[in-house]
């Protein structure tokens, strides 16, 4: 039994979030107007977050497993993207595989894709398929590997038909034993049963979407504009949240704190190059966050033309500056260049880019002041 026809767009760039890709395809398949760029921006992924513990370098950038789940949503309060597009979203799990399979079949009969939680360890097209590397490095793997989502468009006794948007871009079948194992998730992997990372993870997890109201293309287009303005607003607001020993910096406050920490780091003779890779990763993540917003601006130009062409050209120049900073920093880290010299150059470049970025978002809000902000809504836990 399968959904026919199923023809995913398959245009997702490598930095896309797997859940956003399959949500986008679910809505498209149901005749909804959806733009892939809308989903991460609705959830404020383009608003940089920089978190640290008091007196300890402990940066989190926004793509980590627990933050994919709820970090921006719980802190900034905008909810998951389908909730802004006329859908109720429910995160459920099943006690048994057979119970879950029955739900998948029910979805297929109603021509709905099933969005399920999965583990790379049991996906045969993945480089981590039954790999010791996955088990040995579980705590240090890129967090996107730990939390993964795929969609199911067909199932029978021998195989499941799945769509895995990123990073695999896989459309096709896997054996039913692999499917059941991957749907159980990391918690059911025997070699990880004592690993604290799997505690609390769900087995047979599924996101169910229920249409509450039908919104048209013009409504989605207006939402795109509101989202672009809201991201600019949150960037300028620069929210700082302190929770015990943790401090979370958003938007321009995140960049300001990064510069402050880099300056302090440059004059700390006791670090001797330690934690440099953390700063390299922080700048890399900032660059990726800018890609999300750049994609949104490209779609706005496609929809509205000249009204956003100036914004796109300006922000594209800013993205290229972040790319140059990221590449330069990582090269110097790998070469173990003299610390003070390349840090001075990095700090100067970040400060210059920060000033341009601040000016961009200020002027963006002024130019599009007639557009209303997105209203925060209560977020669900994914």
Image (spheres, rainbow, N blue to C red):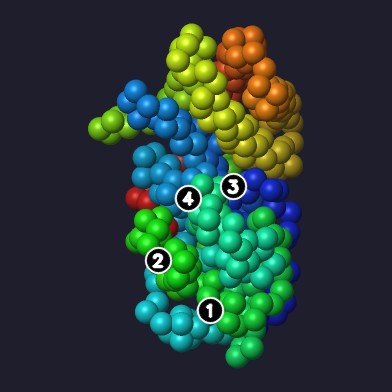
Q: Where 184 sits versus 14, above or below? A: below
Measured as percent of width and height from the top left, residue 267 is found at 48, 9
Instruction: Indicate left or right for 213 with 53 as reference.
Output: right
The residue tagged 1 is 180
Query: Mark 4 falls on what kind of element?
Result: loop
Query: Is 294 in front, or is 267?
Result: 267
Label located before the other in sequence (2 or 3): 3
Query: Mark 2 falls on what kind of element?
Result: loop
Question: How many angstroms separate mark 4 from mark 2 (CA)?
Answer: 13 Å
Q: Nearer the viewer, mark 3 or mark 1?
A: 1
Q: Where 97 sits versus 349, above or below? A: below
Measured as percent of width and height from the top left, residue 303 is found at 70, 43
Q: Do the residues labelled 1 and 2 touch (CB within 8 Å)?
A: no
Question: How many angstroms separate mark 2 from mark 3 (CA)?
Answer: 37 Å
The residue tagged 4 is 139
The residue tagged 2 is 193
Label located before the other in sequence (3 or 1): 3
Question: How many angstroms separate mark 4 from mark 1 (CA)?
Answer: 24 Å
Total numbered badges shown on the rendered structure: 4
Label located before the other in sequence (1 or 2): 1
Q: Are marks 4 and 1 in contact (CB under 8 Å)?
A: no
Q: Residue at x 40, y 58 (%)?
A: 195
Q: Which of marks 3 and 4 is in front?
A: 4
Query: Is 366 in front, or is 117?
Result: 117
The residue tagged 3 is 38
Q: Which of marks 4 and 1 is in front?
A: 4
Query: Mark 1 falls on what kind of element?
Result: helix
Label located before the other in sequence (4 or 1): 4
């Amino acid at each position: 039994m399968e959904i026919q026809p199923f023809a995913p767009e398959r245009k997702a760039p490598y930095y896309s979030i797997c859940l956003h890709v399959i949500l986008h395809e679910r809505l498209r398949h149901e005749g909804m107007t959806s733009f892939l760029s809308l989903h991460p921006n609705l959830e404020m992924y383009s608003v940089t977050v920089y978190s640290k513990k008091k007196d300890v370098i402990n940066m989190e950038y926004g793509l980590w497993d627990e933050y994919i789940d709820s970090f921006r949503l719980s802190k900034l309060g905008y909810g998951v993207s389908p909730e802004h597009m006329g859908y109720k979203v429910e995160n459920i799990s099943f006690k048994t595989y057979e119970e879950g399979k029955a739900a998948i079949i029910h979805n297929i009969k109603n021509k709905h894709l099933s969005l399920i939680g999965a583990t790379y360890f049991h996906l045969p097209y993945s480089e981590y398929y039954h790999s010791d590397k996955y088990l040995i490095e579980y705590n240090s793997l890129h967090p996107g590997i730990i939390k993964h989502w795929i969609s199911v468009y067909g199932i029978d006794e021998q195989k499941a038909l799945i769509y895995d948007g990123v990073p695999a871009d896989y459309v096709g079948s896997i054996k039913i034993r692999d499917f059941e194992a991957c749907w159980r998730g990391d918690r059911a992997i025997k070699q990880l049963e004592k690993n604290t990372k799997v505690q609390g993870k769900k087995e047979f997890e599924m996101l169910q979407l229920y249409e509450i109201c039908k919104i048209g293309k013009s409504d989605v287009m207006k939402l795109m504009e509101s989202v672009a303005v809201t991201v600019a607003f949150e960037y300028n607001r620069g929210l700082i949240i302190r929770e015990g020993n943790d401090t979370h910096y958003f938007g321009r406050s995140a960049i300001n704190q990064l510069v402050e920490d880099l300056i302090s780091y440059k004059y700390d003779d006791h670090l001797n190059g330690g934690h440099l890779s953390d700063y390299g990763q922080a700048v890399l993540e900032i660059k990726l966050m800018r890609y999300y917003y750049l994609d949104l601006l490209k779609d706005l130009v496609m929809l509205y033309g000249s009204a956003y062409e100036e914004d796109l050209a300006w922000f594209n120049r800013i993205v290229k500056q972040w790319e140059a900073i990221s590449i330069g920093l990582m090269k110097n880290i790998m070469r173990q260049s003299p610390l003070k010299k390349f840090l001075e150059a990095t700090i100067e470049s970040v400060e210059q880019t920060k000033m341009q970025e601040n000016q961009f978002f200020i002027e963006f809000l002024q130019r599009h002041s007639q557009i209303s902000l997105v209203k925060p809504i209560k977020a669900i836990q994914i």
